Amino acid sequence: MRIALFITCLNDTLFPDTGRAVVRLLERLGHEVVFPESQTCCGQMHYNTGYRRDAQKLAVRFVKTFDDADVILAPSGSCAAMVRDNYPRLGAAGSRLQRATTALAPRVHDLSELLVDVLGVTDVGAYFPHTVTYHPTCHGLRLLGLGDRPYALLREVRGLELVELPEARECCGFGGTFAVKNPDVSAAMGADKARNVAATGAEVLCAVDNSCLMHIGGTLDRQRAGVKVVHLAEILASTEQEPAQL
Amino acid sequence: MTGTFLGMPTFPEAARAATADAQLRHNLRKATHTIRDKRAEAVGELDDWTRLRAAGKAVKDRTLRHLDHYLEQLEASVTAAGGQVHWAADAAEANRIVTDLVRATGERELVKVKSMATQEIGLNEALEAAGITAYETDLAELIVQLGDDLPSHILVPAIHRNRAEIREIFLREMAAWGTAAPDGLTDDPRALADAARVHLREKFLSTKVAVSGANFAVAETGTLVVLESEGNGRMCLTLPETLISVVGIEKTIPTWDDLDIFLQTLPRSSTGERMNPYTSTWTGVTPGDGPQEFHLVLLDNGRSDVLADEVGRQALRCIRCSACLNICPVYERTGGHAYGSVYPGPIGAILTPQLKGTGGELEASLPYASSLCGACYEVCPVAIDIPEVLVHLREEVASAGGAGHRVEKAAMAAAEWVLDDDRRLGLAQRAVASARSLVPRRLPGPVGAWTDTRDLPDIPEESFRQWWRTREKGKRKRS
């Protein structure tokens, strides 16, 4: 299958390892991967902070970039949710933007959806000999409804021991500009999440969104908790021949 | 007398103090987690919850769409049953109507069943100014009133207090308000409840006027409905000679049949109970039984403006169950006072700025008091998409360009300019990468708070886009 990557601006700029892992994984599974270079950002930050017009412009760019793609992968739960859930609300009812985004939305998938629903695979042949706990990020949990998919994928990874995260459904407190506008509450939420992660004794915290991982990981680092944060794609791309480096 | 929310600081400021208060955080965490677990269990018992939720939403939407019609029907039904209906456009008018009605009875004291509408209009303070004392009879409202405090929760106003604090308040204040607390009062919940019962009984038996709110007003019969747990509401509704009910116009529902839905969803969402202990309904007056004079004050106070907003109007579906407060991770860490308004938590963050406008600094800060995690929408029994309304209100605040938003608007526009062109983004990424060794561990300015508690990620040498381009070039060379 030919899969168009929407790598997202944060991954592109700060977490290129996630993008490289996605490419390695999908090519290993025998698929063709393309990266339309005119892509930039989904506009989630603008939309969520109240700058709808800026977000509209970025949505127009997104539609132009991905209009031809049959299957679009966004390895970020919140960006996938932005395109799928919020884009259709961006344009006025019946507008061209609304029609275009509504038509595009069903083709956008998070990594776990792409693998389980579209490609029909849970065992991707990965090897990752570490104890892992999984944080189901809010947008993955509530907007995308990922459900058991990420767990199903992790359970098939050889060498991986999956441990349950207490209070897993609680928000980590990142929330984009929320972390800047309400720093005290954001930090308090992050500290509780980090404490729950550390309590599992896991070596690795996994999620499908690097923005949440950046927030929790930054808190864990500051606490010298010794837990690494790793995107699901990097665990699934890891093999015995080419193991992911912690 | 209980203070008011006037002149409260913005949410981030108030939240700083709240998050630093370990006792408060402990009280809130314990209470919210207990109620949310109970709610989840009670909701999980019903296999038609999804349909009940959709039905509640539909009834409320239909009523709001034709609110003018149902309000006229309600007025006619209440009048036909021997009650009197008064229309109040705003808080001042509602307070004036109630004060005049109490004055006409010649009484200087009244008892109250807990009501959000009267909190919203500051009725107790208005009555006090007119020389009339209002006694709160809900246990938690009593604790708040005696403690010269403000409510912190819609359903559990004293959620921020623990047993030891309540004991102290009772011992210190009860005597000044009526029957004193017994000597040797312990912080055992039963002992505290008994002290309140004795204190309140005297009020119930001696007071001739009562003020209530209502959970629902049934248009077809003119019946008002109050759901409660303690029986104090029923005492207020039946014992006095005059009953004055102050009710927001959005509490109207068309028929008794519609109540069927909410009598299931409200108790399960609010207290995690299958059914609340007391459901009281009253229709006009009945000679020789209960209050002989009944007044219904229908309150607008900004609701018509909310109704005019296509996205925001869904907030008027709210049945004040508090499920969104109990599940909200932000509320859990700050409590209700940080919201600086009568309605705290996620629903307060959308309702208050809509009722009062986003012109004030506090009101403008409320739509940002959320990480948009969506837990509130998930538990809302009438499916109010709170995150959607929050974003909608943020747009209103940001476009008004008030304090702090001018800089932000420029930053957002600059970001959009970079992001609206992949070459510009590529150049920006190279600039960031080349300065990677210069980025300090702690950042200055407004984003500095981030680095107070969190380490920044390392900036990579190469963006994904650069890596991809190099790889594609390599592939082309090989082929």
Image (cartoon, coloured by chain):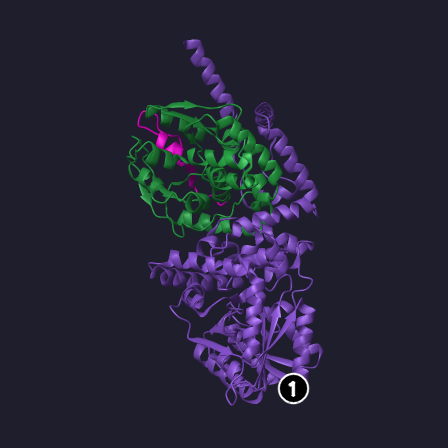
Chain colours: A green, B purple
Q: Quadrant of the C terminus of chain A?
A: top left
Q: Amino acid at mark 1?
A: Thr
Q: Is residue A181 left or right of residue B254?
A: right
Q: Is residue A23 above or below residue B366?
A: above
Magenta-colored stretch includes residue A242: yes
Residue B318: image location, x then y, percent: 52, 61
Residue B200: image location, x then y, percent: 53, 83
Judging depth in this view, the residue of B329 and A71 nearest the camera is A71
Q: Is residue B199 above or below residue B121?
A: below
Determine the image quadrant of residue B295. bottom right
Q: Quadrant of the N terminus of chain A?
A: top left
The segment highlighted magenta reads A223-246
Few, some or many C-alpha atoms within 10 Å of disc 1 (few <14, some 14-19, many ≥20)? few
Q: Is residue B237 left or right of residue A129?
A: right
Residue B425: image location, x then y, percent: 58, 27
Magenta-colored stretch includes residue B231: no
Residue B151, visible in the rendered structure: no
Residue A213, visible in the rendered structure: yes
Which structural element holds mark 1?
Answer: helix
Q: Is residue A174 above or below residue A83?
A: below
Q: Is residue B265 left or right of residue B237?
A: left
The residue positioned 56% from the left and 43% from the top of the image is: A48
The residue positioned 50% from the left and 66% from the top of the image is: B253
The residue indicated by pointer 1 is B105
Residue B211: image location, x then y, percent: 58, 78
Q: Chain of mark 1?
A: B
